[in-house]
Image (tube, helix red, strand yellow):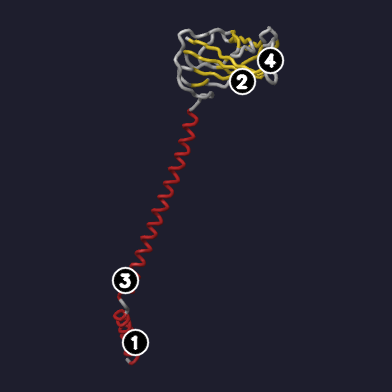
Amino acid sequence: MYKLNFLFNNVLLINVLLALILVFLPFPSIAQMTEGSGHDSEHGQASGHDSEHAHGEKGNMTEEKHSGHGSKKKDHDHQTHSMPQKMPNHLDVALAKYSEDAKFFISITSKLKPVAINKIHSWVLQIRKPDGEKVSNAKIHVSGGMPMHGHGLPTSPRATKYLNDGKYLIEGVRFNMTGWWELKFMIKSGHHNKDKVTFNIILK
């Protein structure tokens, strides 16, 4: 009986002490603890939002980068674009002529006859000096395009072989539509002998 009374008294004492602690504990401290917990929770949410926002921005940057890369690929013309030009009333379509400064007499002949649309083919370019001497050591740069459309050639033709008798093989030519095309040749022979020529080709 004595032991039960002692145990009961101890439990009662503990309850009283807990009640006193709750009564005298400052209320602002409890509130601050509660607010601090809520603030930490909000901060965690904000951090998650910032992380998600940053991830979204990174994704957008990646998409823009790939988008830019894709648009670059769409530009398939290998020659420089220029302003569209109107076709002259009397267009020179001769396939043999002097270069602009008359340093060379040049002729071209297609190996594909007739010239067809969207077929890779070759041309033979022959270069002579004004006195008729064949030029065998020329360096040739090829360009061209469609003046009325303002775009270049769809391929990058080049001189690949000297065929003797002043003739050079021009490979990799392709015309992808009908209309007025230009084939332009920059020719250099020796240190100071440099000139250019343009041939007009009408495809129907």
According to the image, label 1 marks what residue?
10
Q: Reading the chain from its start, which is encountered first: label 3 or label 4?
A: 3
Rendered residue at 38%/60% (across/down): 43
Q: Disc 4 residue type? A: Tyr
- Contact (Cβ within 8 Å) of mark 1 with mark 3: no
According to the image, label 4 marks what residue?
162
Mark 4 vs mark 1: give the one in front.
4
Mark 2 vs mark 1: give the one in front.
2
Q: Disc 2 residue type? A: His
Q: Distance between the residues labelled 3 and 2?
A: 83 Å
Residue 153 placed where, x, y %?
Answer: 53, 20
Q: Reading the chain from its start, which is encountered first: label 4 or label 1?
A: 1
Rendered residue at 46%/41% (across/down): 62
Q: Distance between the residues labelled 1 and 3?
A: 31 Å
Q: How far apart are marks 4 and 1 (CA)?
A: 115 Å
Q: Distance between the residues labelled 2 and 1?
A: 107 Å
- At mark 4, the secondary structure is strand
Residue 160 placed where, x, y %?
Answer: 65, 18
Q: How far apart are marks 3 and 4 (CA)?
A: 94 Å
Residue 130 placed where, x, y %?
Answer: 66, 9
Rendered residue at 49%/9% (across/down): 91
In-front residue for pair 136/157: 136
Q: Reading the chain from its start, which is encountered first: label 4 or label 2?
A: 2
Q: Reading the chain from its start, which is encountered first: label 3 or label 2?
A: 3
According to the image, label 2 marks what residue?
141
Q: Which mark is residue 118?
A: none
Determine crowd level at label 2: few under 14, some 14-19, many 20+ residues with C-alpha closer than 10 A. some
In-front residue for pair 64/101: 101
- Contact (Cβ within 8 Å) of mark 3 with mark 2: no
- Residue 70 visible in the current orientation: yes
Q: Reading the chain from its start, which is encountered first: label 2 or label 1?
A: 1
Q: Which mark is residue 31?
A: 3
